[in-house]
Amino acid sequence: MGDAASCTLEELSKKNQILLTKSQRMYLKIKRVLDCLCSLLALIVLSPLFLIIAILIKFASPRESVLFKQKRIGQNGQPFWIYKFRSMKQGTPELGTEEFTDATRYITTVGKFIRKTSLDELPQLYCCLVGTMSLCGPRPLIARENEIHFLRGYYGVYQVKPGITGLAQINGRDQMKIYDKVSWDRAYVKNVSFALDLKILWKTSLKVLRREGFQDHSAEDAAKT
């Protein structure tokens, strides 16, 4: 593992590709088309909801921006911009989930609601539309979470696009340990299929409706602005 540690994340990701079947490789191409069509339709249908959320955020915090963008690590270890409805105050430290002891003091009033209902994630549909994300896949992380990035690169997780939701999210979400997250992420890549994506989307919908697996002190999307 010494040689692997000296590689860049991009080199590590390309070196440790999981061998996919011909049907899986074909599905990944079809998946891009499905992501584009579904995200475009969702953006159109949900546009009134986007407007309502934007108004609520602006009304509650006039000086805060409605959206925030943040660099995350995507396919092949490449950085990209992720977008969310702002749920935390500007100036929040950029930390990983496990590094926050009390993130509640940074969360706005409206932010608390949209985080619990996962409505803050909706702008990521734009990321799916432009191709930096997919509806399903490993959740993208901030650059400074070095340990999990190394593990993801070493186990071939970064050969697929990151997703709005994934296997880790339906099997524990914020409470999961790093090695467990990587294990689920790897399992997703090894078993990627249309049926698996449908299962993930269905279970994610149920978890969001039941508000399962959420912790108020999570700071996955904490950001400096």
Image (cartoon, rainbow, N blue to C red):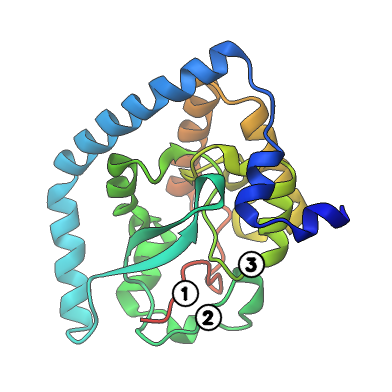
Q: Is residue 72 above or below residue 35?
A: below
Task: List the residue tagged with mark 1.
Answer: 222
Q: Is residue 134 left or right of residue 6?
A: left
Q: Is residue 9 left or right of residue 197?
A: right
- Determine the CA span between mark 2 and mark 1: 9 Å
**N-terminal of the two: label 2 or label 1?**
2
- Determine the CA span between mark 2 and mark 3: 17 Å
- The reply to whether residue 135 is visible in this rendering is yes
User: Depth check: 7 or 88 in front?
Assistant: 7
Q: Are marks 2 and 1 in contact (CB under 8 Å)?
A: yes
Q: Nearer the viewer, mark 1 or mark 3?
A: 3
- Determine the CA span between mark 1 and mark 3: 13 Å
Q: Are marks 2 and 3 in contact (CB under 8 Å)?
A: no
Q: Residue at x 50, y 28 (%)?
A: 197
Task: List the residue tagged with mark 2.
Answer: 103
Q: Residues within 10 Å of mark 3 (few under 14, many from 20)?
A: few
Q: Amino acid at mark 3?
A: Glu
Q: Amino acid at mark 2?
A: Ala
User: Depth check: 220 or 170 in front?
Assistant: 220
Q: Amino acid at mark 1?
A: Ala
**N-terminal of the two: label 1 or label 3?**
3
**N-terminal of the two: label 2 or label 3?**
2
Q: Are marks 1 and 3 in contact (CB under 8 Å)?
A: no
Is disc 3 placed on a helix, strand or loop? Answer: loop
Task: List the residue tagged with mark 3.
Answer: 145
Q: Nearer the viewer, mark 2 or mark 3?
A: 3
Q: Position of residue 52 (x, y in %)?
A: 15, 61
